[in-house]
Image (cartoon, grey):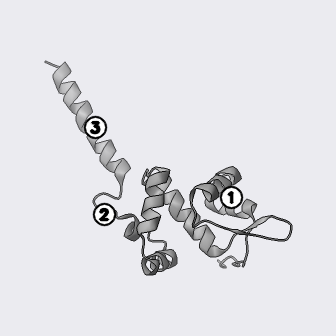
Amino acid sequence: MEKPIKKLYYSIGEVSEITGLKQYVLRYWETEFPSLTPSKNRAGNRTYREKDIQLIRFIKHLLYEKRFTIEGAKQKLKEIKPEDWQKAIETENWSELDGSTPETSDVSTVLHEVKKGLTDLLNILNSW
């Protein structure tokens, strides 16, 4: 299978499709995250570069997978060293940046196990 051709600039529609985010979410994130600043062409349309897309993917990871608040995600972005950011972009290994460890990286699994344990406990109590 051939690799897709990488472009120098992407439109907001293309970035929306690539990231799975609605265009209005991307525009809103621009107002919340100072580091997300796509340039605009002469017509005033946003033009995203690969680094912008990687930043969007990381923000999405923090907000949707790690359940950070917007303020928490902003703080996390401020804490990241530029050299760490570059390495993570190249590998898309966000766990190095978000501070998660293999034991804590899958929150949904942990929550599922806790729920199962509580359900089992409830069943035992109800059987008395």
Q: In what element is the residue under mark 3?
A: helix
**Residue at coordinates 57% horizontally, 67% vertically from top-left?**
35
Answer yes or no: is residue 20 visible. Answer: no
Q: Earlier in the sequence, mark 2 or mark 1?
A: 1
Q: Which quadrant is home to the C terminus?
A: top left
Q: CA–CA distance between discs 1 and 3?
A: 37 Å
**Residue at coordinates 42% horizontally, 77% vertically from top-left?**
84
**Residue at coordinates 86% horizontally, 66% vertically from top-left?**
43
Q: Quadrant of residue 53?
A: bottom right
Q: Is residue 127 above or below residue 46?
A: above
The mark found on residue 102 in the picture is: 2
Q: CA–CA distance between discs 2 and 1?
A: 30 Å
Using the image as rendered, state which of residue 92 and residue 1 is in the foreground: 92
Q: CA–CA distance between discs 3 and 2?
A: 21 Å
Q: Circle 3 is placed at which residue position? A: 116
The mark found on residue 16 in the picture is: 1
Using the image as rendered, state which of residue 13 and residue 25 is in the foreground: 25
Q: Position of residue 19 (x, y in %)?
A: 62, 60
Question: How many C-alpha atoms fall within 10 Å of the one at disc 2: few (<14), some, or many (≥20)?
Answer: few
